[in-house]
Image (cartoon, rainbow, N blue to C red):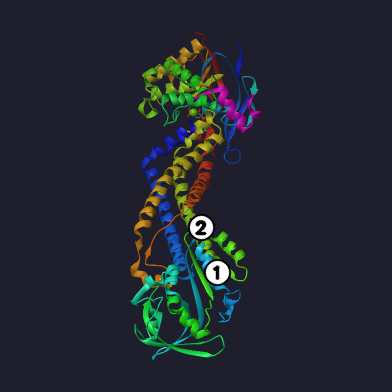
Amino acid sequence: MKPIIEISGLEKIYNPTKVAVHALRGIDLTINEGEFSAIVGPSGSGKSTLLNLIGGLDSPSAGKIKIDGTDISNLSENELIEFRLRKIGFVFQAYNLIPVLTAKENVEFIMLLQNSSKQAREERAMNLLKAVGLHAEVDRRPVEMSGGQQQRVAVARALASKPAFVLADEPTANLDSASAENLLDIMEQLNRDEKITFLFSTHDARVVKRARRVVTLEDGLISTDISNAK
Amino acid sequence: MIPVVAWRNIWRNKLRSIILLFSIALGLWAGIFAISISNGLNHQRLTNIIDNQLSHIQFHHPEFRENNEVDKTIDNSESIVASIRKDPNVKGISNRTIVSGMIQSARSTKPVMVKGVKPSDEANVTALNTFMTDGNYLEDESKSKIKPILLGKALAEDLGVGVKKRVVVKFINADNEVVQELFKVKGIYQTNDSRNDVLSVYVPQNELNNLLSGEAISHELAVYLKDDSNIDAITDNWAEQFPGVKVESWKQLFPGLEYANTVSERANMLLLGIIMLALSFGIINTMLMSVLERVKEFGMLMAVGMNKTKVFSMIMLETVMLMLTALPVGLFLAWLTVSILSKTGIDFSDYAEGFNNVGVEAVVYPLLSYDYYPKIILLVIFAAIISAIYPAVKAIRHNPAEAIRKL
Ligand SMILES: Nc1ncnc2c1ncn2[C@@H]1O[C@H](COP(=O)(O)OP(=O)(O)OP(=O)(O)O)[C@@H](O)[C@H]1O
Ligand SMILES: [Mg+2]
């Protein structure tokens, strides 16, 4: 199996000059293509920090991160943005979408940044929105959709750029149970049918249950790493 | 799509954008309107001076204007007048004899410029006949025994004389002899330049020539053109054609007049610049508020792959679009006001006293030539770009992880 994320000796210290916070204290982790994995752990254990570093949104204090064969710690700021655009799909807890654009335009926007043609954009946006079950909502703006629907648009948007994997930091944290289950159904289906790699963090026991691999963080270190083949 | 996003972003907070839009539009309107009044005043002042005093082009003996000496006359003035009169550009030409002297009444004595003119020709050039407030204008063929004279209203008041009263005019003739002559006030005139009115008195040219030397002499030929757009070429042309005399347009006669125009034009642009500067602070403030509200959104955009240049240009675009929306509104308001008021005029007659002293009428006609508009548009775009920079820099200051953490 092809490794997509390779992490070794990863450390992150916030505020090194003032009150230093050692958020990650030496993480070694490999995520392979096609995984559907969850990062869990108590609040403050370093889940978001880890996902931000993997996503190239912040830089590590020590250690290495290789994404799809590229060592991202050597990239300049602009190269990193370009890298994120091509390789990583993001789903955040909230504020995923541009409020002034419709669902379809939000999905298209990411492809526009990649300079795809108008026709290709429209076609792919429609297909993705259909895949997340939103064919009726394509022309709605975020305020006209429920939280669950917005998160599904975010998943469609994350996939629009054909990334190597999707990174989601607590994607269900703001959703009720039904919406959370629904979002997971869609993510699971995309993972199964389209072989999309998902790495997400969560607090939510229902979400943890659905993951095929669960990596537990405690105090900036991996305490357990359990795969349950389904 | 970025322009679409920028445009829609402007209208996320409608009230805020509309308030800003109107303040820009009103600022522009006020600035342009003030400029057009100042332009109108300038134009009127200049037109008045040209129409009622200077005329467009004057001919003199090359040394006459140094000391107004009586013997510095124009040679062959009659033939020059005859040939100028044939020129299709010319509306009128006035042949003048000018001598400085004193005027005396029972009450007092004043220094004056005595101008001998042919009444009908002078009327064609300075329209002096239309400025009579009392009595009558001069006639080409005078029948009265006592020679007629026209005085300015201010001078008549100083001398304490009215129509049909007598005054004595004294000057030195070509033979260096003092000449004293009795005149009867035929009419009183008042132009919109009170400084001229106390100085110039008009008499028939033949009478003045008789008193001076008995010959048909001339010191000044004043030409009024039908269309002054080619004034420089015409002046040069005549100067070549009549080498013995000095031919000068009003620009050369009074260089200060044109200079004053240039200065006031610069002052106008400065005024507009100051207004735009004030508006820029409003724009910076509004854009800054709007940017700070959206820090998370910019973090998300940068996280998913929108680079800082694009985020930066989006904010710039929002600001410029807002300005360009306000621009036509302001320009239209200004254009409308100026076009209406340039026909009706603005009546300042309550302050007319002061206006007359500087050579303008009480009713001001605002004026804005079309070459002002591109300058204004450039100024607005420049102000928009300058004021967009700071908010745009603020928008890309955070790294995405910091911005997202605020989610
Ligand atoms: N920008 C930052 N500056 C300083 N300290 C930070 C920063 N971000 C995170 N931390 C600290 O690093 C540690 C790990 O934080 P992190 O956000 O990664 O935890 P988490 O596991 O995602 O928690 P939660 O479940 O509450 O989201 C915490 O102690 C946190 O206070
Ligand atoms: Mg977290």
Q: Which residue lies furthest to the top in this view?
A: A230
- When asked about the image quadrant of residue B129, the answer is bottom left
| Frontmost residue, B147 versus B332 | B147
Q: How crowded is mark 2: few (under 14 residues within 10 Å), some or many (20 or more)?
A: few
Q: Mark 1 lies on which chain?
A: B
Q: How crowded is mark 1: few (under 14 residues within 10 Å), some or many (20 or more)?
A: some
| Frontmost residue, B323 versus B133 | B133
The spot of residue B124 in percent (x, y) is 43, 68
The label on residue B151 is: none
Q: Is residue B45 something that shows in the picture? A: yes
Give yes or no for residue A78 being in the magenta stretch: yes
The label on residue B229 is: 2
The label on residue B80 is: 1
Q: Mark 2 lies on which chain?
A: B
Q: Please tell me whether residue B309 is drawn above or below residue B90 in the rendered image.
A: above
Give yes or no for residue A104 being in the magenta stretch: no
Q: Give the range drawn in magenta.
A: A71-91
Mark 2 or 1, nearer chain start = 1
| Frontmost residue, B94 versus B339 | B94
**Judging from the image, what secondary structure is the residue with disc 1 in?**
helix
The spot of residue B235 in percent (x, y) is 57, 63
The spot of residue B145 in percent (x, y) is 38, 86
Label 2 is placed on what type of residue? Ser
Q: In the image, what residue occupies the spot 42% across and 77% down?
A: B197
Check if mark 2's residue and mark 1's residue have beta carbons within 8 Å: no
Q: In the image, what residue occupies the spot 48% across and 42% down?
A: B320
Label 1 is placed on what type of residue? Ile
Q: Are marks 2 and 1 on the same chain?
A: yes
Q: Which of marks 2 and 1 is in front?
A: 1
Structural distance between the alpha carbons of marks 2 and 1: 23 Å
Q: In the image, what residue occupies the spot 51% across and 61% down?
A: B87
Q: How many labels does the image show?
A: 2
